[in-house]
Image (cartoon, grey):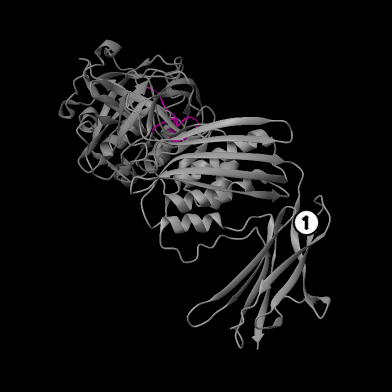
Amino acid sequence: MSGTTLGRRSWSRRTRTRTTLIAASAGALVATMISGAASGTAAEPAAAAAPTAAAEDPCPEPFPLAAVTEGMPVTGLTVSHGREPDEITGEIVNVLEDGIAPGVDMIVARMAGSEITDPETGKPWRGIWAGMSGSPVYAPDGRLIGAVSYGFSYSPSDYAGITPAEEMYNVRNYASGVQAKRTVKVPAKTANQMEAEGGVSERQIDSGFHRLQVPIAVSGVSERRLHRTAKKADHPTRRLVAGPGARASEEPIPVTAGGNLAASLSFGDYSQVGTGTATAVCDNGTLGFGHPMLFGGKSTMSMHGAHALFIETDQFDGSYKIANPGAPIGQITEDRLAAILGVEGQTPKATMYNSNISATNGKQRDGSTTLTQKFFPDDIAWVGAMHFLVNADSVFDQIGGGTGEVNWTVELDRANGSTVTYRGGDVFASPGDLTFTALWDLYDDLYRIDTNRFEKVTVTNVTERASLDDEFHAYRLGVVQRRSGGEWRNLKPGSVIRAKAGSKLVLRTRLLPRNDSAGSATWRRLVVPVGSALAGRSGPLVVSGGASTFNPGKVSSLPQLLNKMRRDPANDRVFAKLRINRPNRNFIRRDNAPAPSHTQGSKWFHVRVRS
């Protein structure tokens, strides 16, 4: 900040208590933007010796927080390219009491190296970039001070917030259960020092020091398509950021202190992965990030090493790491305020998604995704739908209209230990976006099963099969006629139909091609009996295409729900349903007939029964 600007600021504004920094977060989360910072000149502290990989196991001794002093030189490790850590250097600025949470202090340091600062000018370059979360910082004697975990928002800054090692080590026992503060007051002395040294702007100091929610980078789908789908599903899009490089490879990549560390909710064709840095690799687990991934407590996320491609500069939201995760090598068991903890070789329980999708353009693909952690209520359904979408988009090779058939098989374990297999499927058509239209019945079925109110179930496997055609074939319901007096007579929607008790309503409806879709108009006949004991009563008659909303009705158990789902009207049929209420038992009669393709529309009539 220039001297001229400082000169214009009043004394009261300069000396008041400030709030600062935001979480540098778990990082890169493979292609995401989390925190940024400002401009200034990097400090040139004396270098301290960082431990080598040989000192990783057991964990390096934590440096006491009480012994951290202003001006202390520090070194650290982080990865900006590849897998081998770079050395970074720095100097302690101060300790912010309760800076992370009540009872959890934050250490503030000014750092340089590994693209944080420009090697020629010493000024902030990328700043404390997203993906550095967990980068270990060591005292001159080699003891672990903590992990880089926070940085300023807005353009690059070389100031870092460090989670103390002692707090991170507590996670191995199981960590503190306190909630993170949203804002932290920074003493005026520290704020003025940071401002005077030129490494942070007035805007950054005034922007607030708070921990960001960690977004999840996903693979296989554009951000626009991701958010469109999430909006319709009411999935929490604030944590989702589409980005490259999130798909886990088949190569396992070892994790070392200062090296890349990734945690995933799902991996495969639809990956949801966060990539940061490992702080310490110990006998009883790997500590990383210096803050939570999702703050989920006990965790079943899978643990991965990763290969860093580059650091992307972002002058507004902050620079971030682009990385390719390796194959899963273990499980994240704790997701706590001060760190995540992973155990190598441990395998989390998972839901497996497999698919086989083909299209009339000649393309075909077999896909797979593994869901390791349910965090949001609809995760089983969400991942199933997104796995379908990313594979269907790849095979269909367009966002366009067409017709398709989709079938799915769901295997689930019930509360009583038994295994149930549910099969669903239907035909779908859309004039503008077939793959998006075709995923919602699958999503709804998975959501109903997983969140049913009758018993706790575990969905273990989901298999999806689809054939897609870029020709749009669809019909809509046209006129409805009734056979009466030897003639077909048009029925006006909403009109009253008089019928004799014990007779039959003989109907037909004309199916019309939607828009310019292929096919020609055709008739379908429907016959609905009228009960002999219904004289004097009345009720609605609905004639409709099968593409209708599922109505579970009155069900009282999981088997009843599954049976109701199996009987859900198919999209390529037309239906007639007569319902007449009686004191002791409702009279419901149906008939249906096949339609040439996906059919929409409905017409309502009122039936009065005479003797």
Query: Which residue is at a point 67% across and 72% down the rendered structure image?
Result: 528
Query: Which residue is at a point 39% across and 38% down the rendered structure image?
Result: 373
Circle 1 residue: 514
Is residue 401 or residue 530 the one in the foreground? Answer: 530
Is residue 456 or residue 208 the one in the foreground? Answer: 456
Q: Secondary structure at mark 1?
A: loop
Query: Which residue is at a point 76% across and 66% down the rendered structure image?
Result: 509
Please rate how many residues cluster around mark 1, counting C-alpha atoms within 10 Å: few if below 14, some from 14 to 19, many from 20: many
Residue 27 part of the magenta segment: yes
> Is 12 on the left-hand or right-hand side of 131?
left
Question: Which range is magenta?
Answer: 26-42
Residue 407 part of the magenta segment: no
Residue 285 position, x and y percent, is: 27, 25
Tell me the amino acid under the disc marked 1.
Arg
Q: Is residue 300 above or below residue 165?
A: below
Q: Please state, as top left, top right, bottom left or bottom right, where the N terminus lies in the image.
A: top left
Q: Quadrant of residue 603?
A: bottom right
Residue 410 position, x and y percent, is: 49, 44
Is residue 219 or residue 292 the one in the foreground? Answer: 219
Residue 98 position, x and y percent, is: 23, 40
Q: Is residue 606 above or below residue 508?
A: below
Q: Is residue 157 visible?
A: no
